[in-house]
Image (cartoon, rainbow, N blue to C red):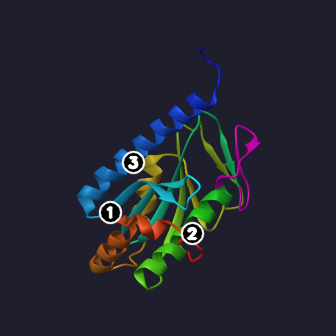
Amino acid sequence: MIGVRTEARDFAVGAKGERFVGGRLDKWARKRGWRVLHAVPVGRNGADIDHVLIGPFGVVTVNTKTTRSKVWVAENALMVGGTKVDYLRNSRHEAERARKLLATACGRHVPVRSVIVFVGAKGITVKNGGPRDVAVLADVRALRRWLRRCGRTLTPEQVDAVYAAARRPATWRPRPGGGR
C-alpha cells in the first residue's frame, strides 16, 4: 500500500541512502587517493558498518541514515521526528570496534572517528555543541566539509597499510573460541 511503512520499505529507503552516500565517497576517494569500503561485515551476527573511509585523516566509520523528519542531537541523545534512536550508541560502538580490530590487524594504534550522515533530513538541531566523539551531519555536503577540516594523522604508506588490513575479512571477524 502506498504510504504505509513496512520493514521492507524502510530497508529499501535506507539502502538507497547508503548507496547515495557510498557513491559520493567513491567519487571523493578517487580524486583524493582515499580508500573506501562499503557494508563491512563485523562479527558473526550480521552487523555491518555502512562505510569505512581511510585517508590521511585516519579511519572514519560512516553510519548513513535516511529520513524526511527533523533531527535533534545533544551529547548523549539523538531524536528523529521526536523519537529517541540509538544511532549515537551504535556509531560509538562501531568506531570503538573498528579501532580495536584495526589496531590488532595493523599492530599499531589506528585513529578512528565516527560520523552519522543524514540523507533527506528536514534539518538538524544541535544542542550544547552536540556529541564530542560523533560528528552528526545534515547531508553529504556537510560530510565533505567535515572531511576537509580533519587533520592529517596517517602518511600515505600508513593509509595503504590500514586499507590492506581493512580489506581482509578476517580483520572484522572474531576468532573462534574468543579473541577479537
Mark 2 vs mark 3, CA separation in Å: 21 Å
Q: Residues within 10 Å of mark 2 (few under 14, many from 20)?
A: some
Q: Nearer the viewer, mark 2 or mark 3?
A: 2
Give the residue at mark 2. Answer: 97
> Which amino acid type is shown beneath numbered disc 2?
Arg
Residue ID for mark 3: 22
Is 11 or 16 nearer to us in this picture? Answer: 11
Q: Is residue 110 visible?
A: no
Q: Magenta part of the protein: which range?
A: 74-87
What percent of the width, then of the height, locates residue 128? Answer: 71, 61
How far apart, in angstroms, are the residues tagged by discs 1 and 2?
Answer: 19 Å
Determine the residue positioned at 31% across, 64% down.
34
Which residue sits at x=65%, y=38%?
A: 70
User: Residue 29 vs residue 119: left or right?
Assistant: left
Q: Nearer the viewer, residue 25 or 174?
A: 174
Q: Give the image location of residue 76, x and y in percent.
A: 73, 61
Which quadrant does the N terminus fall into? Answer: top right
Which amino acid does the dot numbered 3 rest on?
Gly
Q: Mark 1 vs mark 2: which is more N-terminal? A: 1
Residue 78 counted in the magenta span: yes
The amino acid on which the numbered mark 1 sits, given as a three-letter code, is Arg
User: Which secondary structure, mark 3?
Assistant: helix
Question: Any magenta on residue 133?
Answer: no
